[in-house]
Amino acid sequence: MMRGRVAYAGAIHEAYPHEQGVRLADGRVRREDEVVWLAPIEVGTIFALGLNYAEHAKELQFSKQEEPLVFLKGPGTVLGHRGVTRRPADVTFMHYECELAVVIGRTAQNVERENAMQHVAGYMIANDYAIRDYLENYYRPNLRVKNRDGGTVLGPWFVDAADIADVTQLELRTYVNGTRQQCGNTRDLVTGIPALIEYLSGFMTLAPGDVILTGTPEGIVNVNAGDEVVCEIDGLGRLVNTIASDADFRPA
């Protein structure tokens, strides 16, 4: 089942896909642009993977690492479908990252990879923006690169794990202003989902609501204020986001 969360008429509603837009839990149907989209779930700790597709690592001129490159993201980074992400005025290269987001459903501690998928509740699309100008070292992504307010777009839907037949064969696509710029497949993950859960749960406890962003494939280009970025993953929907300038965020 696909489900999301939206704000409408002063309340937060569970929402579901509808041919005319979105159906609220009380049965009302509204256009997508009539509601404010939130992240589909109450997000816990966010674990983000870097360089987890071989061709993307090659694109950035980095070779395979000894173990997964993982960093944490704060709650202020999270933004919903159709949200607006700020592009700082002093940067020259900011790009999107379409990623499969894995949502933990059961507490995981010292889980072996053979049992890891039992701890997965479902999946979302993520668009995790990066600002390369602020990068000090590819192996130590600093806070300004990956922890911008509103820089991690999640949604529009949470999809139950049981509804995805094969999570290792999902195509990812990113369009900038209608032109496809990025395409990849989860079969090309360097470290797959079971191995990631085994790795992370080996030294810390994963809790329900925690999210693992599994990395992005090759095909990154710079985005500018006014650009519309759309990320798609098979079976998970279509995540829309717009880039805005510093000036757009300043009060009149």
Image (cartoon, rainbow, N blue to C red):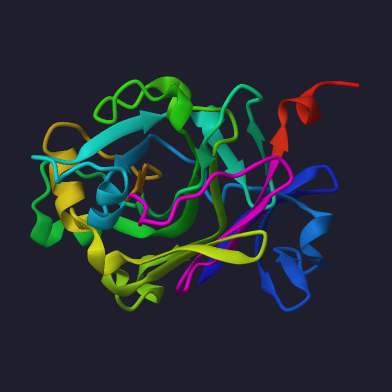
Residue numbers of the magenta segment: 215-243
Please tell me whether residue 159 belongs to the stretch shown in magenta: no
From the viewer's perspective, tell me whether residue 226 is left or right of residue 34: left
Q: Residue at x 22, y 61 (%)?
A: 117
Q: Position of residue 173 (x, y in %)?
A: 48, 65
Q: Residue at x 55, y 28 (%)?
A: 76
Residue 17 vertical placement versus 60 (above, below) = below
Q: Residue furthest right?
A: 252
Indicate the quadrant containing the C terminus: top left, top right, bottom left or bottom right: top right
Please tell me whether residue 232 belongs to the stretch shown in magenta: yes
Residue 144 vertical placement versus 71 (above, below) = above
Q: Residue at x 65, y 65 (%)?
A: 178
Q: Position of residue 209 (x, y in %)?
A: 40, 44
Residue 248 vertical placement versus 21 (above, below) = above
Q: Position of residue 11 (x, y in %)?
A: 77, 45
From the viewer's perspective, tell me whether residue 186 is left or right of residue 20: left
Near-viewer residue (103 or 245): 245
From the viewer's perspective, tell me whether residue 177 is left or right of residue 70: right
Number of numbered markers:
0
Quadrant of the image occupied by residue 171: bottom left
Quadrant of the image occupied by residue 51: top left
